[in-house]
Image (cartoon, rainbow, N blue to C red):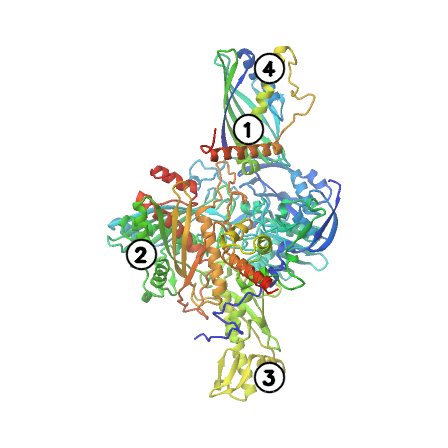
Amino acid sequence: MATKKLVRVKVNGRDREAEIEPRLLLVHFIRDVLGLTGTHVGCDTTNCGACTVILDGRPVKSCTVFAIQAEGREIQTIEGVANNGQLHPLQEGFQEEHGLQCGFCTPGMILSAYALLEKNPHPTEEEIRWGISGNLCRCTGYQNIVKAVQYAANKMSEEKHAA
Amino acid sequence: MAIKIEKTFQVQEPLDGVWKFLSDPRKVAGCIPGAQVTEAVDDRTYKGLIKVQVGPSVTDYRGEAHIALLDNEKHEIQMVGKGQDVRGKGSASMKMIGQARALSDGSTEVVTVSEVNVVGLLAQLGARMIQEVSNKMFEEFTRNLRTQLQQERVGGTEQPSNSGTASQPQPIKAVPLVLTVARESAGRLFRRIFRGSGPR
Amino acid sequence: MLHKTSPEIGGMGHSVKRKEDLRFIQGKGTYVEDVHLPAMVYGQMVRSPYAHARIKAIRTEAARNFPGVLAVITGQDLEKAGLSWMPTLFHDKQMVLATGKVLFQSQEVAFVVAEDRYTAADAAELVEVDYEDLPVLVDPHRALDADAPILREDREEKTNHIFHWEVGDRKATDSVLQSAPVKAKLDAFFPRCHPAPLETCGCVADYNSATGKLTVWETSQAPHAHRTLFALVAGLPENNIRIIAPDIGGGFGNKVPIYPGYVCAVVASLQLGRPVKWIETRSENLQSTGFARDYHMTAELAADRDGTLRGLRVKTLADHGAFNAAAQPSKFPAGLFSICTGSYDFATAFCEVDGVYTNKAPGGIAYRCSFRVTEAAYLIERAMDVLAQELKMDPVELRLKNFVPPDKFPYQSPLGWSYDSGNYHGAMNLALEKIGYRDLRKEQEDKRQRGELMGIGISSFTEIVGAGPAHTFDIVGIKMFDSCEIRVHPTGKAIARMGTKAQGQGHETTFAQIIAQELGIPVADITVEEGDTDTAPYGLGTYASRSTPVAGAATSMASRKIREKARKIAGHLLEVNEEDLEWEPGKFYIKGAPSKSKTIQEIAFAAYTDLPPGLEAGLEAVHYYDPPNLTFPFGTYICVVDIDKGTGEVKVRRFVAVDDCGNIINPMIVEGQIHGGLTEGLAIAFMQEIAYDENGNIQGGTFMDYLVPTAVETPNWETDKTCTPSPHHPIGAKGVGESPNVGSPAAFVNAVVDALSHLGVRHIDMPITPWKVWQILKAKGVAE
């Protein structure tokens, strides 16, 4: 077994560190070491996106990133999306528009949508579908997920104008 | 999963020398990356090992190869081989027909047609790669073959170093292999797409 | 009959936002993999690379001695405890860990338990197995050949034939097929596919050696049935077993069977006295757990020249893999396949099915299809189009002509089913209007002149769900009732538990809505729990669209029992006789004096503080519901496709789905179910197959090859409804979760064939990949 290495990461705004094997996957670091189980594992070939987290502002599939690659960087998981208990417009949108059923793809889906809206606050339907094309869902058929993202885009745009 | 592999290559050596080399399984094994002959059961049947590495997964096939036909006049050889992974990860079998002929400039052309059958994890993940991995193995084989033949002619080592004595045979490492292969596949794909839309 | 409730109460018909969402959108769900117990260890399977081989030896010393490894279990170890084989859900047994031989690629051979998952994976690589490979059987058509290898040496009869099942009138049907002026024959293969829920199967087995209690967190759609089976098979007292099915990330039938991984985890936990977690990878899920379909079907239709149907003859070969692990009612080896007469009025029909073993993963389960109903609906809807082509008749006209008319319900089908209610013309006409059928046919005509390929596919399916009445239905002997237990607290809030287990269907909301409808207690005040066998009443679980028809009915009946007791209490509080009271959702009032009333909340409080003499305290009820019949949801789907002549790609331009599931509890949730099921149908029709090569190597074993549609491939679905309540169901509801998966494959395939029918194409087997289409276009000389 390889020598353990110290990894220091900022997770949802908090500094976290642990001694880990270099081969430990980021998703296992998040789930098993940090105890944040909102990020899920749905496949073993980097296809499904259930493990999506945001690494230094970019959505990544954490099953295909080593924890050690996150050394000194910032991660945001689903647990960090709500603001002090106040739901993010995306989270509201998913409930309002029935954008989830079993909930397993939802954290990854929300984070991909989050990253999309950061880059493109007014996406077209096509852009939304492309934006979440790395996240598989077996329950919803995506139609209501698209509506959820549109709900969030509209709400965030309103809030921005109100501010 | 049966895969047909057809390979033709040329060696700048006269037919006799090439044929003598090719009809000696020990010498041939010496040129295949990761292979070694461990026992001669009789003059037509040999036991051996071949190690293939795909990513972190190493498959050590242990098996037998048998020369079904050796025609010294027509310079045709037919071989059948079968191996099982020592840990139980799967098996592979192969039928190969090789034909050597002299070319007008004194060099030799060898035509091989092989059918490879793979069972196990490799057949699932590696199916798309098996053709490419075989290509790479073949390239290395012909490189080694040419080197050996040249050395023999020049009067160097008679026995290839992989006759099971000194160093361990180096397996073809299919991870850098896979990357090269993937890059090349992608390259070919792009060329196919853009063919006809640009200068050749 | 059904009162309308206010949005605050949220009874039937309200699109109440889901209560379960709150935890999921914050990543606070508890799926099995999220369960973390002190001293927990991890299990990993070692699997066979061979489809058929004898095991000569298994060497586990290297694995056992690897640091961090606690146990390595083989079939031989289990044999000592009589556990190397376990019963399947269908009159067969399957190996838990291989003994003697392996029968399919990826079969479980050994179970390694270690301190952490990475160590378990390292150690699994060190287990060595010597195999002697045997000839492989992957073609079910060869299974009964004289020289076919016999797969199941453990069975008394040395044959690959599992069962023969038939129903209907063979003689009358043969005669009609002989004499009919028009005949149409169709060979249709429904490929092996896999439900692939996003969460794979797994469990945490926790045996507490101090108390003797075994707790298993399990991805199970039927926790009570699992508990009973564990008790019977493992010899553990049932009161000392607790199965907890927590949040489940999708099931679709995949999580109904008991898998070797669960048994191994339980055995390991019993052995080590520590919690053992086993979660399979996606590859393991696709390659070894319950597959679906794999039906080779032939349908023959007999008709008059004007298109009136005379008879249907069906013959099917069912490929069950290495063990018959079908999850279906015990008297039905082909499930409810005999619904294959569909929405049409046949005078006579005959259906026979033969099941065989092959060297493939065991099964098949009911993938969102209520036991083979998808296969049946696909067959009849495709056959109708083939007949329409034969008759040169519009497929809509042919269907309208032969639909069971509304006045013939309850309808006795020639294959033995009594359809409760239906209005097939209604659904069809609404769908035709929504899609603009006449204009589409005109457009198709124009496009054909210009050499463009466009197709319209119809599917007018009838489903059969809600298994099922005790006189006919049981799974491994357990009758298929379901249950609900409700308790109303003094402050008027309630908790309810059912014997079902949702995996995304929204029961926490919809079952609360049923109670809200019956008792007038607001949905927000009702907690619904499922899945813990220590607290929930016994039920057969959620699959086959049975939750609403069976447990929903139980919920309604339990609520009515409470209402009856509430009436007594109200009478006492208002000092009148029970007969002088009227009910409206939420309160009883005196007839003619509506201001004199008592709310259900006041009554609940009184149930603990001010009871009429002789009446027991409390306000609760439990009901076990035995459905008098199944229910028959139906619908018409119409799909429009355009085919790219250069690439063979099929684009779904529009898809209209008109569903009739009787009275609807939550329209938003029903719509979501339709979207999801249609997307699964799309995947099956165009991009999915678990195929095997001649050596038994699985070709669709990972998500790289077994394709799940993304948001890009999935079109927008247009949904609508008609409403024909079920006459025998307390709230007139039928269940709908599976309709879209049942009805849609035929719509997609019919559309593609329709696009190419003028070129002489009659049928294309699924999956209809661009490559397949392009080859047809090339053969017909129209490829670009």
Where residue C438 is drawn, which disc sits there?
A: 2
Give the chain letter at badge 2: C
The chain to which mark 1 is attached is B
**In contact (CB < 8 Å): disc 2 and disc 3:** no
Question: CB atoms at circles 1 and 4 under 8 Å apart?
Answer: no
Q: Quadrant of residue A12?
A: bottom right
- Location of residue A149 by image quarter: bottom right
The amino acid type found where label 2 is placed reads Arg
Amino acid type shown at disc 3: Leu
Q: Which mark is residue B134?
A: 1
Query: Do dots 1 and 2 share one subunit?
Result: no
Name the residue beneath numbered marker 3. Answer: C611
Q: Residues within 10 Å of mark 2 (few under 14, many from 20)?
A: few
Q: Secondary structure at mark 3?
A: loop
- Residue C182 sits above or below residue B143 on the image: below
Residue for badge 4: B149
- Percent from the top left, x then y, of residue C735? 46, 63
Q: Estimate the spatial distance between the alpha carbons at disc 4 and disc 3, rounded to whole Å.
A: 105 Å
Which residue lies at the image location 55% right of the left edge and 22% below the top edge? B66
> Mark 3 falls within which chain?
C
In the displayed structure image, the side of residue C617 where residue C762 appears, left or right: left
- Residue C764 seen in the current view: yes
Using the image as rendered, state which of residue B4 and residue A14 is in the foreground: A14
